[in-house]
Amino acid sequence: IFATVGMATRDWLVGDKRAISAALKAHSTISSSTNYSSKKDYADADGESRSRSDIKPQIIQQWEPTFVSTVVLFSQIGFLGIILFVIYSLDKSSSDKPISMAGFDEDEFVFWILVILLYTYFVSWKRNDGKPEHRRNRTLDGAHVQDDATQTSHTTTSRSKMKEKIRQRTIEMASLRQRVEDGNRGDGASSQGSDLSKRLEEVLLTDDTVFDTILDTIDDDIQSKDESELGLLEKGSKFLGFNVYGQFRRICDVKQENDVLNRSQTLEWKGLLSVIMLVYQYNMGEYYQPFSNEYESSLKRVHVYDNLAKAAMTSLLFLTGYNHTYYFNHPSNTNRVFKLSRVLQVCMRINLLAVFMCLVLGKTNYGVCLIHTSWFLFIWAMMHIGHSMNYDKYLFRLKLLGAAVCIFLFWDCNISRVVKINGAWEASQTSWEWYCASYLHHWSAFIGAIFAINQPIASLQLRKLESLNLLSNTFAKTLLSGTLLVLALTWAAGPLRKTATVYNVCHPYFGIIPTLLLVNLRNVSCSLREHHIEMLSWLGKYSLEIFILHHHASNIVLISGYPRCNFLAISMILIFTARLLHNTTSVIRHMLLPANEEEKCCKNTVVCSGGIMILYAAACILTWTETVSLGTISTITMIVGILLYQVLTEMTWSDYRGTAPKLKKNQFEDDEEAEEGSTTKVSPPLLATLSICLLGYALYQAVSTSSMHSCNPNHANKGRWVPLSACLARTKLDRNFNKMNYFGPTQSTLNTTEQWAWPENTCGFHYHSKTELQLKLQEKRIVLIGDSSVRNLYHSLCRFAGDLTAGGYEGTSTSHSDASALFGSTSLEFKWAPLSVDIITKIKGMTVSLPTASEGGPDVIIAGGGVWDKLHLENTDEVRSSQEVTIKTLASELKSLRKKFGVSVVWFVPPIINTVALNSDEKRAQISEGNVDEMRRMYAELGVLQSASFVLDGPKFTQDRVLDSFDGVHYPNHVYDAGSQIVLNALGHLWGVDANKSFIARSYLPATRSLINPYLGMMMLCFVLIGLFYFDGYFGVGYLAQFFVKKVSLSPSELYKDAFDHHPAIAQDQISKEEYTEVQEHESIGLTGRSSSSLRRR
């Protein structure tokens, strides 16, 4: 940034401004280039690549050691840094915001998706080729028809074109006949044939009436033959009055834009998935856990929306495999597509932003980028190795079968018996998470690759179906779509509604079914194929950036109290930021990794990687030496910036000024030395220093704001009881209890309860929903030690963990004993220790064999006491002295737990005693509120409170509920629930704001053997064989189209030759432009005006 500001300032002062103009135009240049590529250039480096024909020259020039090129590159890098700085500030300022206030609402989630989808459809339903819509009149049954004038004009035009073609052929025949006659003058038969030919030529070339009569006769003859060849289904339909010939059907033009899964569709699909992902994140779907009353693991609970999220991820990987394979397999792409520069471009496109986000924010939420990169490299290797076989019908598919076998061996077989690889995955948490995530989708990208190589066949099959009569077309497509729909419904009723453990095993093999159904339904008609939703397609260009940023959007609150307005504002900012990041990273990628420049790409990659590693090492050194401060960072930035600015200007400035426009050069020619020596050389470093100071001040404000929000965990006690209407969630009551609303409108103001809350807090404290609390406790072991008040806190945590019966009447024999409960991966233990000496005994008993928390020891120990000491110990000086020693020992043990074992320690101060409600005179004399308060002060003075990580202030959250104490000591369950809420908020600060997210990842990591299923893997190999050697992208379902059609070949194996000989993308590379236009016109005439049999006979 320092060097950029300095160089731009110097350029401005001399009045040249070429470098500034180039830097400002970089974003608009890449935007216009992207818009052009959406129509012509299908070779973008992000995997959305198709054909490289008719590509314009690269507009973004590669980086060269010149002044203008350096300013453009450095300005983009600096702009990227500023955006990352803003994201860092927003993330830090919102990191303590509540994760979920009301939990996941299915109704609101589906509502938002439908509203956005319908709105974008009605506003931006556009043709793929960009042409305007054709206006047509509609019949009552919705069929497209043309008015009489248009239809007559079309018929006349088609017939005139056909006449002209036949006349041209006739002229060629006449010239050929003349040459034959010249060589055979004495043959009478030849002379007679020549006379007949002459008369036929005269008729065809001069008499239009006879010509039209001949065409009509041919049509009548063909129609009569077609009628005689009608099947029983067609004859019955004709008898009932249905349109057998389908005069009103509509045929798509044979163009790439109208193929199955064209570029517009794939971008639209990515845009739709991005919208769903945003709404799902905003509604906290990823944190939604359908816990039941049973004590079971999250892996053993049915989570339909989480399973659907995995299916959406499968669709994205399907598109990844499809796009890259389509690009590599396209005949117009030569061996240059396999160059290393292409690989580096795609890897940089996928990972550049994710790497910088990880370094800046210190988070690793972008593992999906690594998965997409892995599958790109797999497909690149699969297509590159033996690429000479890629256009052989069977060798290419045998090669792909070998790749499928590799997938089967790696993920579906117990490969650890041969190679100790699974142990390596399990040794590292990160590698094991990647292995599990990749396992869930390990067939998705390869299925997309199979569909890509069979895509021309699927497109031709649909065009042939649409050239048939309406009835056959409708029944064949219904059978195709219906079969896939039945399979999808079976998946929805079966694996989708299974527990996470079962679904994780089934998903890699059955999760692709809904994707294939969506592909089929999206392309079922000509109109659907040649149109797309432009807004979603536009969003699809930035799907990668949206995915990376959406993790940080849900916790940002700009409009408090208006969640829908806040969602709209945050979404607009996020999409705008994603577009800026896309353009910025694209400019950097084009400049550093120029296309087809192997040496420069490798050199720049090494230099950039080395620079990033040096900066990261410097940051680690500053952290290790504890010298990280705003002053240190600013000083280092300015020193390095001055050196960089000085070196760059000395290298590039003289050449840059030498190429300045003539007028400006003459203007400064006389006193250039004086001008360069005064203002021009001094001002740029000063302005650059000022810019660094401003950025440092902004960083300081952001850190200060974040520090203000990062309050002391003990501030969690600073809340109060607030009234809460029981009718606030009436819509959920209506849905969950069959519209039986237990609270009427007039009762809402009377039936209120109270809940502990933090109305004025700025620390992000909030009332955790049960879902969020259960998530925060995953993979945690919590041990509670103390008297009956601590036991009631234990019951409260059990209720939040799923046991709604906890805290009921147990009897004295049960309540004065130890207890434990296991809720999935959460362990809760209670140890009965009414006296302080009992607490010490329990703690010492644990520390004898206590491992660290990371090795299975307790994560949290909650201890409390003092009331029973006051009740059962005599009030003498000797006992008091002994008690002081005991309390000091307790403080020492608590401190040891924190320092030696890293355990979070919570001390529970006894709640307020309702003296008048105590049920005996002895208790009223011994444990009155005054006496207990004296004991509280003793524990505080002797260091118990200072030894704890957090102090749960019992008197604070019970002072307004004293009258609720039924026996003077104990309170209703909802009061202890408030104590649990305070503890959970405090632990959120002690563990870190992202702790709960890491728990989620760990809870979905099953054991190695539970992932291995060779039988299902062999099933997938069978389907791969069908897809490869039966040439069907729908893996056998495409053959069902032949069931209703007998006269035309529709099976994918029979369409192979025609598909790859006449596919529009391939034909453009094999025939001349004039011949290709003629073929298109001929097919258009035949498919719109005649049946397929008529076209074949002509």
Image: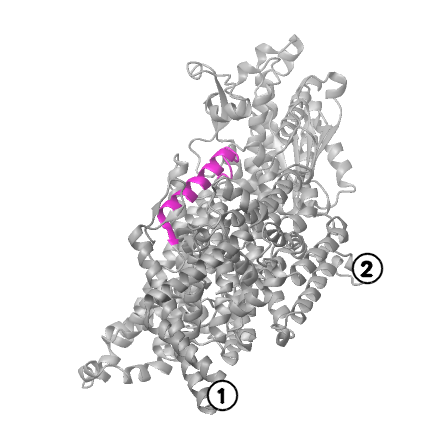
Please indicate whether residue 223 sits to the left or right of residue 205 in the image.
right
Q: In which image quadrant can residue 317 be found?
A: bottom right
Q: How many marks?
A: 2
- The residue pinned by badge 1 equals 187
Magenta residues, start to end: 98-126
Q: Nearer the viewer, residue 148 or 427?
A: 148
Query: From what the image shows, is residue 949 above or below residue 1005?
Result: above
Amino acid on which disc 1 is placed: Asp
Asked if residue 1077 lies in the magenta stretch, the reply is: no
Point out residue 111 in the picture as x, y percentages from the top left corner: 45, 37
**Residue drawn at 43 percent across, 77 percent down:** 196
Query: From what the image shows, is residue 349 above or below residue 729?
Result: below
Point out residue 146 in the picture as x, y percentages from the top left corner: 34, 51
Point out residue 973 in the picture as x, y percentages from the top left corner: 60, 21
**Residue drawn at 28 percent across, 74 percent down:** 18
Which numbered disc flags the more N-terminal residue, 2 or 1? Answer: 1
In the picture as drawn, the residue positioned furthest to the right comes out as: 417
Amino acid on which disc 2 is placed: Arg
Asked if residue 99 lies in the magenta stretch, the reply is: yes
- The residue pinned by badge 2 equals 417
- Label 2, residues with CA under 10 Å away: few <14, some 14-19, many ≥20: few
